[in-house]
Amino acid sequence: MSWMESASPVTLLFNFAFFYPVVMAFFWMVGGIYYYLRRERGGPLPDAPPPLRSHPAVSVLVPCFNEATHIADTIQAIAAQVYPRLEIIAINDGCRW
């Protein structure tokens, strides 16, 4: 007689409800430790930009139709970026959206 034949459905349901979270918690913890050791340890911080040999030129296009009240703040915010080769182009595109 196997253990499946001797166990009642209530016992099987109880065993599943008890052991499933325990087993899955173990897998989550092992997976988290593996991910930390394999991917995150010793790497650069997520907010650090990747190192570049040279900075390519970047153009920022700003559509500004009827935006006289906000355009100065927008241009100042873009110009405050820390990037050596930044070009800002304000375009009156005539768009109503």
Image (spheres, rainbow, N blue to C red):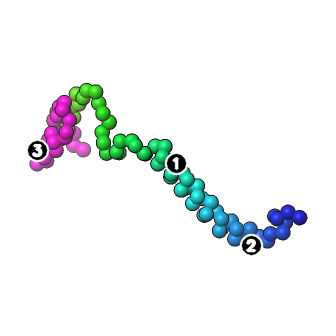
Q: Is residue 93 visible?
A: no
- Describe residue 76's horizontal placement relative to residue 13 as left or right: left
Give the alpha-carbon distance from disc 1 to disc 2, as whole Å.
36 Å
- Describe residue 43's horizontal placement relative to residue 77 as left or right: right
> Is the residue marked by circle 1 packed among few (<14), some (14-19), or many (20+) residues within 10 Å?
few
What amino acid is at disc 2? Val
**Which residue is painted at 52% across and 48% down in the image?**
34
Q: Secondary structure at mark 1?
A: helix
In magenta segment, residue 18: no
Find the magenta span and give its range: 68-97
**Mark 1 or 2, which is nearer the eye?**
1
What amino acid is at disc 3? Ala
> Is the residue marked by circle 3 packed among few (<14), some (14-19), or many (20+) residues within 10 Å?
few
Say which quarter of the image contains residue 2.
bottom right
User: Which of 45 and 84 lies nearest the eye of the viewer?
Assistant: 45
Say which quarter of the image contains residue 76.
top left
**Residue that numbered label 1 is attached to:** 34
In magenta segment, residue 94: yes
**Which residue is painted at 49% across and 43% down in the image?**
38
Q: Quadrant location of the N terminus?
A: bottom right
**Residue that numbered label 2 is attached to:** 10
- Describe residue 37's horizontal placement relative to residue 8 as left or right: left
